[in-house]
Amino acid sequence: MTGLTADPAVPPGAARQRPAAIRAVPLRHPWRWVSAVVVLLVLAGVIDTFVTAPQLHWSVVGQYLFNGQILQAAVVTLYLTAIAMIVGVGLGVLLAVMRLSVNRVMSSVSWFYIWFFRGTPVLVQLFFWWNIATILPTLSVGIPFTHIMWSESTNKLITPLLAAILGLGLNEAAYMAEIVRAGIISVDQGQTEAAHALGMRRPLVMRRIVLPQAMRVIVPPTGNETISMLKTTSLAYIATVHELFFTQQEISNFNYRIIELAIVASIWYLAMSSVLTVFQYYIERHFARGSVRGLPPTPIQRLRRMLFQFHAQPPFVADVEPWLEANPPHSGM
Amino acid sequence: MPLAPMVRAEAVHKSFGRNEVLRGIDLEVAPREVMCIIGPSGSGKSTFLRCINHLEKIDAGRLWVDGELVGYREQGGRLHELPDRVVCQKRSEIGMVFQSFNLFPHMTALENVIEAPVKVKREPVAVASERGRALLDRVGLGDRLDAHPRQLSGGQQQRVAIARALAMQPKLMLFDEPTSALDPELVGDVLNVMRSLAEEGMTMIVVTHEMGFAREVGDSLVFMDSGYIVEAGRPRDVIGNPQEQRTKDFLSKVL
């Protein structure tokens, strides 16, 4: 490979032969192996304890895992999570924009809402909505000073599901408002200025310029909130919603297999939150556009690259010479 | 009879808290004039520029653009604040280019350029896109329409920013140190675009440290220091034969 200097594509400074790649003996880490063994032993012990516990009937877990009632309850849990998050995100964005509004009335209302709903337990809020009929037996909406009025019995109106949606959604909105606010603040002031200088008005600037850029900051904690909501829906049992937790409890009240059914519910919660985690990864990747030069690889792309690089790596030191001959540096190939 | 001034400032004052940034600015910019403003940092150059399109409110004095008061209307001897809608409408007639480009990073170059024409002026996307392409072509980026700002060099980004401002067909262009954040080898492309704009007769106010540009392209030069206009005149005269000691000190440092 002495003809390298003749290659016009190679700048003069790079004309020297590239030395062989460094193939050092890697540093050994014996403690990693020791700790791995310890962890495996502890894990095996824990698993053994549960698998062989005489009072724990794994066949019951298997029997109820795909039970119709349980499956239906899992669907209710997912549905409740989705609706509560939609209410939470929608209202949260509104509250965040209000909180940052130059209008003092708007920002005060938003401040008060967040203060109230963040400061009381969500279980109490659910309890409140479920029992609201005790203080307001009928709900009426009307135009003041006229006879135009619509009213309905509260008990008929506030179904278990609606009480749960109100309780979870309104509470979530307070947390989402703070997340969205953090996202909005994170966007460079110069963006707003440039948009104003082009004659864009506040709502347009918020919608077209600030919020799309804030998404990068908003999405990760929102994914976190969604997964948290998936589990918080179990509190809807207090409003007698037939979600996963309430249903498994109903079943175990009959057959006394309390831990078995708790395991069934846990398996479903874990499975659903795992799926949400995958969604979150792809949504985050989507909103990274424009803020990074290249998108991070998807897990599948990463796997493919790993396999490909494994093949492309030069073999061991002993065979470097023939390998270099086959893959000459700066060969332009 | 000279033309009515495009920009007229009379005793403009501006403070941020106790910090008085502008302490009485008087100047006039005629249509088609290119005025360069120089001065040390903190002298109030940028603040004055931002007052012209009402990104900052002035505290005292009067400021007119194209014969109309900026940010207010005068009625019965009193000033009334203008509603947001009117302020924005007037801003849309003034182009502004920033030191840090401030392109919208989630949009491509072309999307950056057509955003305001489509959303503010309600132009059809096809019309705005056609002019946007022509503008990007003009600033030498006809082949980078679909690039995101982060994929462009600083000089390219600033040229997209100029195209974005021009897309609103402004009657006045404000440049706030447009080349200060650029690598030296990228400054020339941006200055060339500005030069060709000046040759076409665009009214421009340019806050800059580029003395060469000020001397060759500028019709007038203003030297500002600590909120005052220290010296103003033809660029050749101010740079070649400064009258004030402060101007001499400043020029000796930058030339």
Image (cartoon, rainbow, N blue to C red):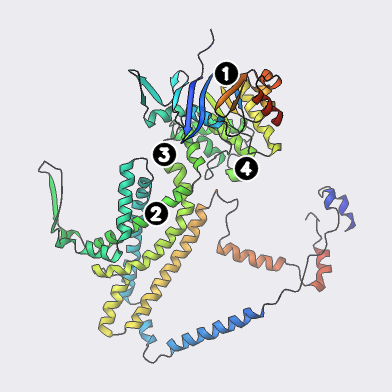
Secondary element at image label 1: loop
Farthest-out residue, right: A2
Amino acid type, residue under disc 4 in the picture = Leu
Amino acid type, residue under disc 3 in the picture = Leu
Q: Which residue is mark 4?
A: B152
Query: Residue A204 got which mark?
Result: 3
Marks 1/4 same chain: yes
Above-or-below relation of A47 to A106 = below
CB atoms at circles 3 and 2 under 8 Å apart? no
Marks 1/3 same chain: no
Q: Which residue is mark 1?
A: B32
Marks 1/2 same chain: no
Left or right: A309 as drawn, with respect to B1: right
Identify the residue shown where x is 63% and y is 81%.
A33
Please tell me which of labels 3 and 2 falls first in the chain.
Answer: 2
Would residue B169 be visible to someone looking at this image?
no
Q: Chain of mark 4?
A: B
**Image label count:** 4
The x, y position of residue A141, in whole percent, is 16, 49
Amino acid type, residue under disc 1 in the picture = Arg
Q: Nearer the viewer, mark 2 or mark 4?
A: 2
Q: Which residue is mark 2?
A: A178
Marks 2/4 same chain: no
Could you classify mark 4 by the number of other residues whose Cα lies within 10 Å: few (under 14), some (14-19), or many (20 or more)? some
Compare residues A73 and B250 and report the one nearer the observer: B250
